[in-house]
Amino acid sequence: MNETLERWGSRRAFILAVTGAAVGLGNIWRFPYVAGENGGAAFLVLYIIFVVSLGLPVMMAEILTGRAGRRSPSQSLAYLARQAGHSSHWRWLGVFGGVTVFLILSFYSVVSGWSIEYLVHAVNGSFEAASPDRVSAEFEAFLADPLRMTFNHTLFLFLTMSVVAAGVSNGLEKLNNLMMPLLYALLLILAFHATTTGGFAEAADWMFSPKWEALSVGVMLNAMGHAFFTLAVGACALMAYGAYMPDHQSLPRAVGMVAVLDITVALLSGIAIFSVVFAQGMDPAEGPGLMFITLPIAFADLPFGSLWLGMFFLLLLLATWTSSINLAEPMVAGLQGIGFRRSRATALVTVSVWLAGLLSVLSFSTLADVHWLAGRNFFELVSTIPSDVFLPLGGLLIAIFAAWVLPREVALRALDAGPNGFRLWRGVIRYISIPLMLLVLVSSLI
Ligand code: PHE
Ligand code: NA
């Protein structure tokens, strides 16, 4: 056992940390636009099915592996595999996770930077009484300005990495404790207000009554990818947090709460956003700009709209901050594991993520039409392939590791849900999750 690792202060602190990792851009920005591009309700139903049948069991697999290993993801995998008489090549799964979080963080930081820009705009009152046309025109103008975008990306990454440099457990707890309830309350107000607007009926129909003819293998892959993305599962990022999990805490109970919270935040944000979409006659498949074009309009309707809007973007920023800290942690822990000092590791990760992020920044101007693969520019590529393919692939391997490689007693102890809970988890992951992930991944390849 590696005695140098700190533990989270309490069970509550662990749940808050995982919630912090889970709730972020995935719920408020990504869920609505991906659902919009995939036809709405059918996507939503699949996404919830995948969260329950894949996301949750694999999340447990991932965290229990970290908890059993008590090391960085790569080291935990190698160590546990060796103990069980398997090859220490399992460490490469940790490296693959590192590549995945690297790519995700590089665009995550850029989009979080958009929230900084909006926060400033809201505080300046420049969205006050803005017409829908003006909001989208301003958003377009912002995207076309690489300097402003780079500034915000730099600021956000700096904020993230300065927390990471200090070590995970310091300060995060208090931040999550304060931010989550406030964000939740604000989204509740917004969704509730949406029910009184003209677009609500159509939005609710579009979100909640599935048109199954819209279903395709592509929609399935996107729904599966989003289930992993939103729960922060499949990149060994939560494995890194599992290493700090206290003894004596039931893992299923902890992650169950996280999943409920995560789904609700996405639903509330979807209701708020799609009510505006339908009230304004916009296209639900608007793309990554969806949230940034609709929310200023939604808030403009409320008394003291700018105030609420500013508060919303502040809370969103805090939520994305705790997610990006989780994205960065496994890279830093991994580099530390191969002998880097924490400060050096942090610096190295910061510089390389920053540089990759520049390519995403430029994808909205200079590099917009430079297609790297499958007709996608850099941003389109990193905001889809790592989430929709790498996370499920990583999740599949993590599931195989936890369900077939780890000895029963080790997994049983790290799951901490009693023998029956353990049997249920292992049955689900062996005979439902693993085959289902394989099925969706393979059929989308063909
Ligand atoms: N779950 C985060 C969100 O929804 C994103 C994330 C993905 C974080 C993968 C960590 C690992 O915003
Ligand atoms: Na999420």
Image (cartoon, rainbow, N blue to C red):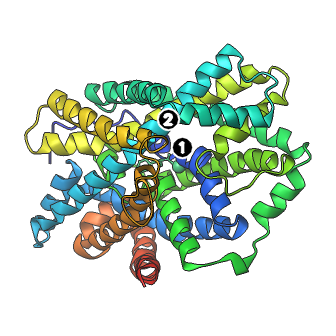
| Residue kind at label 1, given as amino acid type | Leu
Local SS, label 2: helix
Closer to the eye: label 2 or 1: 2
Residue neighbourhood size for the residue with mark 2, other residues' Cα within 10 Å, grouped as few (<14), some (14–19), many (≥20): many
Question: Which residue position is annotated with label 2?
Answer: 112
Number of labelled discs? Answer: 2
Quarter holding the C terminus?
A: bottom left
Q: Residue 306: horizontal and vertical position, in percent? A: 74, 21
Q: CA distance from mark 2 to mark 1?
A: 8 Å
Q: Which residue is drawn at the image coordinates 65% and 77% (left, top)? A: 215
Of residues 146 and 46, the one drawn nearer to the viewer in this rendering: 146
277 relative to 395, above or below? above
**Residue 228 appears anywhere in the view:** yes
| Residue kind at label 2, given as amino acid type | Ser
Of residues 69 and 320, the one drawn nearer to the viewer in this rendering: 320
Q: Disc 2 vs disc 1: Cβ atoms closer than 8 Å?
A: yes
Establish whether ligand 1 lies closer than 8 Å to the Cβ of label 1: yes
Q: Which residue is drawn at the image coordinates 23% and 57% (left, top)? A: 94
Question: Which residue position is annotated with label 1?
Answer: 25
Is 121 on the left or on the right of 64, as rendered?
Answer: right
Q: Which residue is drawn at the image coordinates 45% and 31% (left, top)? A: 146
Q: Residue 171: horizontal and vertical position, in percent? A: 39, 24
Q: Residue 383: horizontal and vertical position, in percent? A: 45, 53
